[in-house]
Structure formats: structure tokens, C-alpha cells
């Protein structure tokens, strides 16, 4: 038996998803066409969402995602971190390197979870809350590779390797989270070495898949 649902709530959530997928906002007419409802319904949905700061409209009347969504998003990080920790612990212990989960935060990559190996004599110090540009470091580059793959309908980009981009002498490997609605990020490791051992790349891909499954 199909559970009873709220049509109004469903439409409101669809509006947010449509707005989240565009950089330029959408007009009432465009939303009406995409939702398959009349303009009056769209006006009411937008008015309600505006009251909660989830939507804003510019001077031209185009609706965009509001700052209220950002506040909600901040509460997602602890939930995502908790779901990712088992896979990160396994990755760190298996590889003997610092493992991390990185999410997109604006134009930056933000490390939201970090696990260091327990058995190594030394490893790279990496802290949760560390930020860096998306185009530097394996974590950010893996996210950008996934974006490019989506834009061109290409295959899974696999993993990304870097050396010395964020810390001299350190190498990184990261793979994007794939198939997780509303979460854009990557899982990776960072180690003190001139190159990443061959087996690490696939192991990082496997860990990213484990995290994606935990979040699905």
C-alpha cells in the first residue's frame, strides 16, 4: 500500500530541487511549466518558502534558493560525518594514511571528517574544518572531475592523484561521492610520500562507494 503523502509539501520540495539545479534562478512561468501546475499554485508555494527564507526573489522576479537552505545544510554535516566514519576508519587503517571526507562549501572544499591511522609511526596531520580551493588538492579535484563527468554524461571519473599541492612532500588520492542526492563531496587519503601506491586509488574508490551507500 502506498503511504499517504502531502501534495503541497511534495510540490514545495520539487521547487527547491529545481532552484538548486540552476545558477540563474527560475521565473514563476518556468516553474509552472516544469511542475505542471498553474501560476497561482507556484505563487503560493514561493510565498510560503520565502517566509521561511528557503527561497528569495530578485528584482527581476526570478526565484532562487534562499539563505535558509544554507542554515539547514549546516546541520547536515554532523549526520554525513557520522555515516562516513566507519568507512574512513577502515580506509585509514588499511592504507596507513590519514583518511578524510570532504564536502563542497561554496567555492571551497571543506574537510568534515578526518580519521588518522593508529598503527603508523608518522602520518600527515589533517584536521576537520580545513578548507582549500576546489582546484587544489586531490579532494577538490575529484569533486571537479565528477562535475565534469556529469556535465558531459561521461563515465565515473574514478580517482584523482595529486602531489605537493596543499602540503610540501604530501601526496593525495581521492574519489568523488557518486549517486548521493544533495551531497557533493569526496573521500580520500593524504600521505607523506612522493607518489601514491598503485593499490590506494582503487581502495579510495571503494571507500567512497561505501560512504555513498551509507548516505543513500
Image (spheres, grey):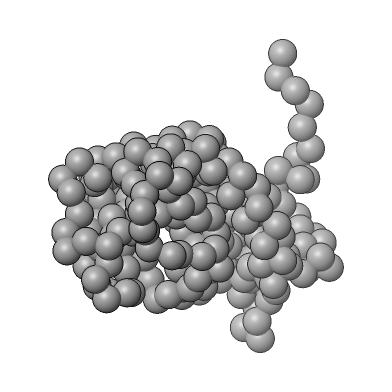
Q: Looking at the picture, tell me which residue is in the foreground, 49 or 115.
A: 115
**Where residue 122 appears, x then y in whole percent?**
36, 58
Residue at 60%, 59% (x, y): give it.
31
**Where residue 143 appears, x then y in whole percent?**
36, 59
Q: Could you tell me which quadrant the N terminus lies in?
A: top right
Is residue 106 toward the left or the right of residue 154 in the image?
A: right
Q: Is residue 15 visible?
A: no
Whether 59 is drawn above or below 149: the answer is below
Outermost residue toward the bottom?
A: 59
Q: Looking at the picture, tell me which residue is in the foreground, 104 or 1.
A: 104
**Where residue 40 appears, x then y in whole percent?**
76, 59
Outermost residue toward the top?
A: 1
Residue at 38%, 71% (x, y): give it.
134
Is residue 88 toward the left or the right of residue 172 in the image?
A: right
Residue at 75%, 39% (x, y): give it.
7
Residue at 33%, 74% (x, y): give it.
166
Is residue 181 toward the left or the right of residue 79 in the image?
A: left
Q: Could you tell me which quadrant the C terminus lies in?
A: top right
- Residue 109 image-quadrant placement: bottom left
**Where residue 174 appears, x then y in whole percent?**
32, 54
Amino acid at each position: 500500500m502506498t503511504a499517504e503523502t502531502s501534495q503541497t509539501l511534495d510540490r514545495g520540495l520539487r521547487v527547491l530541487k529545481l532552484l538548486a539545479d540552476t545558477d540563474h534562478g527560475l521565473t514563476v512561468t518556468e516553474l509552472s511549466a516544469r511542475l505542471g501546475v498553474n501560476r497561482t499554485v507556484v505563487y503560493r508555494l514561493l510565498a510560503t518558502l520565502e517566509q521561511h527564507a528557503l527561497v528569495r526573489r530578485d528584482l527581476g522576479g526570478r526565484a532562487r534558493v534562499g539563505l535558509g537552505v544554507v542554515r539547514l545544510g549546516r546541520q547536515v554535516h554532523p549526520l554525513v560525518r557520522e555515516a562516513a566514519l566507519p568507512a574512513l576508519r577502515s580506509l585509514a587503517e588499511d592504507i596507513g594514511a590519514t583518511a578524510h571526507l570532504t564536502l563542497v562549501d561554496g567555492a571551497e572544499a571543506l574537510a568534515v571528517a578526518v580519521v588518522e591511522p593508529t598503527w603508523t609511526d608518522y602520518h600527515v596531520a589533517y584536521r576537520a574544518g580545513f578548507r582549500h580551493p576546489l582546484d587544489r588538492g586531490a579532494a577538490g579535484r575529484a569533486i571537479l572531475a565528477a562535475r565534469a563527468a556529469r556535465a558531459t554524461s561521461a563515465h565515473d571519473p574514478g580517482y584523482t592523484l595529486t602531489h605537493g599541492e596543499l602540503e610540501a612532500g604530501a601526496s593525495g588520492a581521492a574519489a568523488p561521492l557518486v549517486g548521493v542526492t544533495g551531497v557533493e563531496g569526496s573521500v580520500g587519503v593524504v600521505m607523506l610520500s612522493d607518489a601514491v601506491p598503485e593499490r590506494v586509488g582503487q581502495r579510495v574508490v571503494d571507500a567512497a562507494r561505501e560512504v555513498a551507500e551509507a548516505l543513500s
